[in-house]
Amino acid sequence: MTADVYGRLGVRRIVNAKGLATRLSGGLMRPEVAAAMAAAAQHCVDIAELQGRASALIAGWTGAEAGLVTSGAAAGLLLGTAACVTGLDPSKMNRLPDTTGMRDQVVVVRSQRNMYDHAVRMAGVALVEVGLPDRYAGAGVRDAEAWEIEAALSERTAAVLWVAGPQARPPLQQVIEVAHRMRIPVLVDAAAQLPPAQNLRRFIAAGADLVAFSGGKAIGGPQASGILCGRQPLIMAAALQQLDMDVELAEWQPPPGLIDRRLLKGLPQHGIGRPCKVGKEQIVGLLTALELFLAEDPAAREAAWQALLAEILAGLPAKPWLTAEIRPRGAVPGLRLTIAPVGAALDADQLATALAEGEPSIRVDRSQAADGRLWLDPQALAPGDPALIVARLQAILAS
Ligand SMILES: *Cc1c(COP(=O)(O)O)cnc(C)c1O
């Protein structure tokens, strides 16, 4: 009955060679994770108790004081920002996103602005941009520097947002140094920084106060899951703004490791994070996936990816205007198809479109199509997918 859920809904399955993109429904879940979620759905638990246990496990895996399962990294950014604004004050929690009279700014390097910082702004703060990204403008070599961040900090600053990535400037260490000098927390968006698994600990070890990861990317958890980890009082503030609060404080017994009731002068109402609630199935699925992700041998994972790409490479028809090569792209290998600017039967965009419009629909990374390149990412490919991709490529290139 459930074998072909998408067919029953009349929705096409796609071959996802684009990678772990949300608009392509992320990746594939391991059977163990799916089974854990199905088992979780068969019993009820106290959700705060489950998040308390998740907190302890996430703390152990990340080196942070505490952690929370969120509905994604973006939800983690909203909750983390809200926590930095309100601290443990329930009246402030109740007022968000109205931040009148509160710390209502988050400082961010201009070159790190991105679509996901909407989640930060959602808490009711304004982003204060710092620096001039000359190195991206092609005008020079510089980007924001730590002293510029320091100059933007004030009693209105709730947090500094740092978006992790190999290109991020200034280095996290310098950002933390200037922020902590003024007792301002640093929130790291590390959504897509896995693998390597060591990055689960890296930003916390550097001194970041809060770090958000996606659960639906490389961890292989539910597509709408993530983790927020960091300092205990901040995670407590985030949890209070995410959890269901339809309860009397006197009768509520949340796990003290996650929520220390003694620190609360009262119980807030449903918070700003209530629309990003997570169910028991997501929490159990994320924890199961994270455990498996950490246990996986990186060399075996790399070998499996290489094998999927090698199968496609081996089946590619030879064309004088088409070159194909497996190359590293950050922590994950990709198959790069390069189409010569002259003499080709079709250009990169036309090839990507033909793949997408075929049966099955095959989605590739076409972000460099203007330069004649398409990339195939192995992370969301199933074992039978390389053969389907080869067959479609052969058919398109033969016609
Ligand atoms: C993917 C991503 C997000 C959002 O993650 P979700 O888990 O989908 O909410 C946020 N920031 C960055 C940099 C990302 O790459």
Image (tube, rainbow, N blue to C red):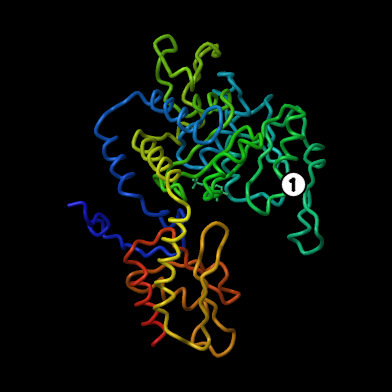
**In this rendering, is residue 363 above or below 111?**
below
Q: Position of residue 298 (x, y in %)?
A: 48, 52
**Left or right: 343 with respect to 149?**
left
Q: Nearer the viewer, residue 273 or 59?
A: 59
Q: Position of residue 217 (x, y in %)?
A: 46, 50
Q: Residue furthest left?
A: 1
**In the rendered view, does 247 fall on the left or right side of 4?**
right
- The residue drawn where x is 43% and y is 65% is 17
**Residue to which mark 1 is pinned:** 170
Q: Is mark 1 within 8 Å of ligand 1?
A: no
In-image side of 162 versus 190 (left or right) = right
Residues 319 and 328: in front is 328
Crowd tier of the residue under label 1, counting other residues whose Cα lies within 10 Å: few below 14, some 14–19, many 20 or above: some
Q: Is residue 136 above or below residue 157?
A: below
Residue 233 place in picture, x, y as percent: 58, 23
Q: Residue at x 34, y 44 (%)?
A: 33
Q: Amino acid at mark 1?
A: Pro
Question: Tag 1's secondary structure?
Answer: loop
Instruction: Using residue 238 as the reference point, say whether residue 246 is left or right of it.
Output: left
Q: Quadrant of the C terminus?
A: bottom left
* Above/below status of 206 relative to 12: above
Depth check: 59 or 322 in front? 59
Decide: is 235 above or below 252: below
Quadrant of the rendered image containing residue 391: bottom left
